[in-house]
Amino acid sequence: MMLIHAMWLTSFVTLPVIESHPETAQSLQIDKPFPALLDYSMSLDFENMDVTDHGHIPYVIILVRLLEEWKKTVSKVVDRY
């Protein structure tokens, strides 16, 4: 909203200030994704994907997929000890 007050040759313009950055960072919760997100991220075949298609995957999908693969490798290492 913009407020303009004009009187003869003088005018005043008032613009509201909107805070664009929140005070606290929001959590993406990629360590506990909801089931549909996890299923979708695990169903993609990155190795056989075209470069253009791979470039259009949202970054959070890639992060969820890699985190799940990392959890599997870490659990194997922990089970050995």
Image (spheres, rainbow, N blue to C red):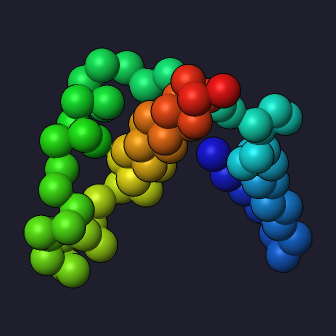
Farthest residue, direction front: 81
Q: Position of residue 43 (x, y in %)?
A: 16, 42
Residue 28 in picture, x, y percent from top left: 57, 34
Quarter of the picture containing the C terminus is: top right
User: Along the horizontal axis of the image, is 30 left or right of 37?
Assistant: right
| Rendered location of residue 79, percent (x, y) | 56, 24
List x then y, in percent, for residue 13: 79, 60
Relative depth, front residue between 45 and 81: 81
Against 59, residue 32 (above or below) is above
Q: Total number of numbered labels? A: 0
Q: Relative to 48, is 13 above or below? A: above
**Which residue is more in the foreground, 79 or 32?**
79
Q: Left or right: where does residue 55 sit relative to residue 68?
A: left
Look at 43% across and 25% down and name the residue there: 33
Q: Horizontally, is 72 left or right of 52 in the view?
A: right
Report if residue 71 is visible in the image: no
Which residue corresponds to the image point at 29% horizontal and 59% vertical from the top-left?
57
Residue at (30% x, 19% y) in the render: 35
